[in-house]
Amino acid sequence: MTLKIAAFLAAWTTIALTFAQAQSLPGKPDTAKSDTTKLLKEVKISTRKPVLVHKVDRTIVNADALMSAAGGTALDVLGQSPGVIVEQDANISLQGKAGVTIYINDKPTYLSGTALESYLRSITASSIDVVELMSNPPARYDAAGGGGIINIRLKRNKTPGFNGSLSLGYSQGIYGKTNNGLNFDFRQNKLNVFGNFSYNTANGFNDLDLERHFFGQEGQPTGDFLQNSFIRRRNSNYNGRLGADYYLSEKSTLGIGFNGLLNPGSENVHNVSNVFAPQGALDSSIVAWNNEKLRFRNGSANLNYRHRFDKEGTELTADADYVRYEDRNHQRFDNTGYLPDGSISSRDLLRGALFSGIDIYSLKTDFSKVLSKTLKYSAGLKTSITKTDNAADYDITVSGITRPDYDKTNHFLYREQISAGYLNADKDFGRISIQAGLRFEHTSSRGHQLGNALRSDSSFNRSYASLFPTFFLQYKLDSAGGSSLNFGYSKRVDRPYYQDLNPFVAPLDKFTFYTGNPFLKASYNHNLELAYRWKHFNASLNYSYQTAGIRETIEIRDGIYYSRPGNLDKQVSKGIFTNTNVDLAKWLNFQFYANAVQIHTISDFYNGRLDNKGTYFFVRPVFQFRLPKDWTLQAEGGYQSRVTSAQFVSTRRGKVTASVSRKFSASTSASLVVNDIFYTFAGGGDINNLAGTRASYRNLSDTRTAVISLSYRFGKAITGLRKHEANGAESEKDRVKN
């Protein structure tokens, strides 16, 4: 399949470049750089947003220009953004670095894992305006997120009266799913009311194979464990956002906003585990039917005020926020053991009721002052308080007798307060532009593990403070600013997810358990970037040094796998990145992204020393053909080599996607996207540094899909309306884990 992908991409590249050269006749003016079509008796000007816009501290991706994301979700938009890789359970990396913080309209999502995945799937691609990629965020942003920040800005209609847009989408793979969204805006006199609502269904599967081979101290085989899990997931996502701005005067605005998310779903797992003796004979089997009923919901409220002192941009903003997350999960693990002759050897039933509630309170104020056309500074203060309540009640039934399972039953309380302040300054010296900032954050926390009949209470307290400098330098190599050299540095922090501090054990199946780690420490990153930009071309060198990095670690004891978060001593990442977006002809646009990253991890580990190093590369070419009568065709591919990071080595994989769209009018368009045509985007890999064990996995999911979407817009755009997108809760949401 890899050869098919490579051949397909090579063929598309050859055909496109040959055709483009044939159309560029000698003496013919170059029309590739113009989007203006001249007609008799009238002039029709059609403009297209560029895919990428580079700023001194971020790269901006225009979502409407990502054709293959049409009809999809925010996850699809992120997956098409340069330098962004989206793995299962919304594990997102930016320029080769994990620990990315996801923001929506300058507000953190406060989520991670499957909860973040569900939330991003509830946001339609058609509702996204731009995506801001910040590998080195400026000081005004919270220091959380060692891998940087990705800020998703949603569209806001700006027309007086009532206007908006509607998008409908249907996706068919092995299973069908829908994705629908509505945006609206109403403006009259001093009042502006806006909102968006979406509904989608997530209907998919994972076909997961696990292999674990055991060895004695002399390296002799002692047995094998082979497991297949077929996982069916069904979710419905209801997401709503409603806000209002009241213009007290020409300079002052008062705003209020509400967000809500309801995500009910289920997960059914058929699990077959076979244990083999050293000689390869079947020793025993366990067949499990695991069922989970899930209900996740989120609500938030924001009150904000803005006062603009002058036309130059001097302003004061203030935000007060409250965020509530609630997660209820009912589990049922029905396990039956069999002997080699098929007779039943054991039977047990484990049931669990899990609850997680998280409350976040935040106050924030920012002030910016424009001293001249070339000098601006800003400052701000923030405080946030987070309270979490996690409870799990388990009981187990064996031989018809039910009793509480106190090894898994627990109740964990956690409280954290973060206080912060920052200063930031921008100065333009002509060809040289400088931005420098310094942020201070103080964190105090307390965790309390309540006891049960078998375990006593325990608690911990922590307090620490840090300074987080940022620095950006841009030098324009020509007076027009067509090419430039850019340098960026930032220090960042990754704090543990709230639930990861819970020390008790939760089952994934009879042979795999997840356990938290109350001894987790904050992780610190130092990130440097040197970039060269010329018109439509961008290339950069990146270096990242991380201490006490928080990673998933796997330990095996008595044949049982325990997954827990742990601090690794240090990890060094070095990478080179390049992307281009250029019109090869009036009818053909070419986009290309590539990177090569080396990751080196060194740490003490369960079975001794962990010292793993590996280099991987990733390429993504995109060809877009603009045809008559507003038809557009697009073909793209992607290939990623094997990735080595800490214990894990993921397999190489790639995919080819094709899409077609038609704009029927200024307000109506439709598209068809076929993803992963050759069905090659399967996950898998190896798990290293396990005592006496060699382990590997392969994960197949519903990646080959056909997506059809329809978009309709109503209303006319105007400019100059006030828009408030920032609030005070800017780093805590992304630490909520499901």
Image (cartoon, rainbow, N blue to C red):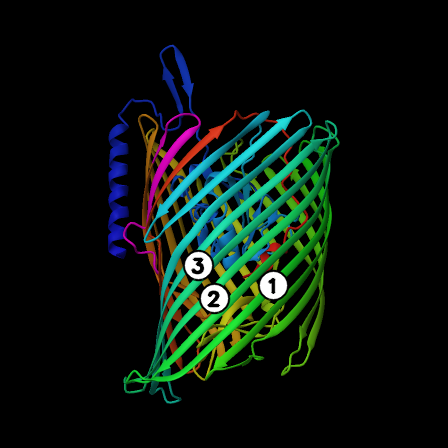
Question: Farthest residue in the front direction?
Answer: 400
- Marks 3 and 1, the one that precedes in the sequence: 3
Q: Badge 3 is on which residue?
A: 88
Is 42 situated left or right of 303 in this image? left
Q: Are marks 3 and 1 in contact (CB under 8 Å)?
A: no
The label number, if any, that marks residue 356 in the structure image: 1
Q: How far apart in space, not on screen, are marks 3 and 2 (Cα)?
A: 23 Å
Question: What whole-number distance in Å separates the C-alpha atoms at marks 3 and 1?
Answer: 22 Å
Give the secondary structure at mark 2: strand
Amino acid under disc 1:
Ser
Outermost top residue: 41
Quarter location, residue 672? top left
Q: Is residue 256 left or right of residue 644?
A: right
Q: Nearer the viewer, residue 420 or 602?
A: 420
Span shown in magenta: 661-682
* Camera-nearest label, 2 or 1: 1
Q: In this rendered view, identify the residue nearer to me: 439 or 552.
A: 552
- Could you tell me which residue is drawn at 69 percent across and 52 percent down? 439
What's under tag 2, amino acid-wise? His
Find residue 587 and report its horizontal and vertical position in percent.
32, 30
Residue 127 is a magenta residue = no
Locate residue 216, reporting x and y percent.
38, 88
Could you classify mark 2 by the number of other residues whose Cα lies within 10 Å: few (under 14), some (14-19), or many (20 or more)?
some
**Residue bearing mark 2:** 600
